Amino acid sequence: MSDCYTAYQLYTVMAKKILVIEDDKDIRDTIVFILEDEKYEVTASGDSRILKSLNTLQPNLILMDNWLTEWKSDANGQQLSKELKSNPATSHIPIIIISAVNNIKEIAEAGLADSYLKKPFEMQDLIAIVKKYVK
């Protein structure tokens, strides 16, 4: 029994943390399901207010939708990414912007994001890009 407990402790220490910010519940739930199946520890939110908890969450990667409907201003995933990447306290966290827009590559580059994922995406594409940035 102690071997099982030790393996579980090792898993909880070694599990990589992914923060998913996606306002579409179906897409968010799908991403969470896929990543948890890959043994990642996932925290998901429908809005960006969760970014106020970054110190507590300490994610190894952020997957962020570019268009978050809860924003009442002009802020979007690109701007949030740029803010996070410009802050020395959070600049080390890889950010992947997800969106269905055609110019997602340019949006990700302007937001200083590490990469992007175009919607709709294949499950294996999501897994591959996460594995690329979370070693």
Image (cartoon, helix red, strand yellow):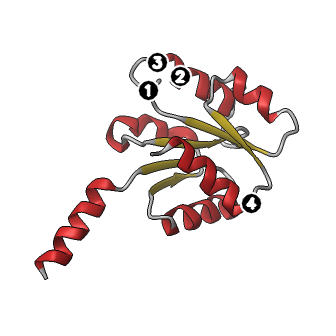
**Residue at which label 2 appears:** 85
Q: Residues within 10 Å of mark 4 (few under 14, many from 20)?
A: few
* Dot 2 amino acid type: Lys
Q: CA distance from mark 2 to mark 1?
A: 6 Å
Query: Residues under labels 3 and 1: Cα distance?
Result: 6 Å
Helix, strand, or loop for circle 2?
A: helix
Which one is in front, 29 or 61? 61
Which residue type does callout 1 highlight? Thr
Instruction: Classify mark 4: helix, strand or loop.
Output: loop
For residue 90, the mark is: 1
Residues at marks 2 and 3 touching, judged by CB atoms closer than 8 Å: yes
Helix, strand or loop for disc 3: loop
**Which disc is residue 87 wearing?**
3
Q: Is residue 49 left or right of residue 31?
A: left
Name the residue: 51% across, 69% down. Answer: 37
Looking at this rendering, what residue extends furthest in the left direction? 2
Residue 85, compared with residue 7, is above or below; it is above
Q: Is residue 59 above or below residue 103?
A: below
The residue under label 4 is 122
Whichever of labels 1 and 4 marks the residue nearer the N terminus, that label is: 1
Residue type at the position of mark 4: Glu
Contact, mark 2 vs mark 1 (Cβ under 8 Å): yes
- Quadrant containing the N terminus is bottom left
Q: Is residue 133 above or below residue 45?
A: above
Residue 122 is situated, as x and y percent measured from the top left of the image, at 74, 60
100 over 95 or under it: above or below? below
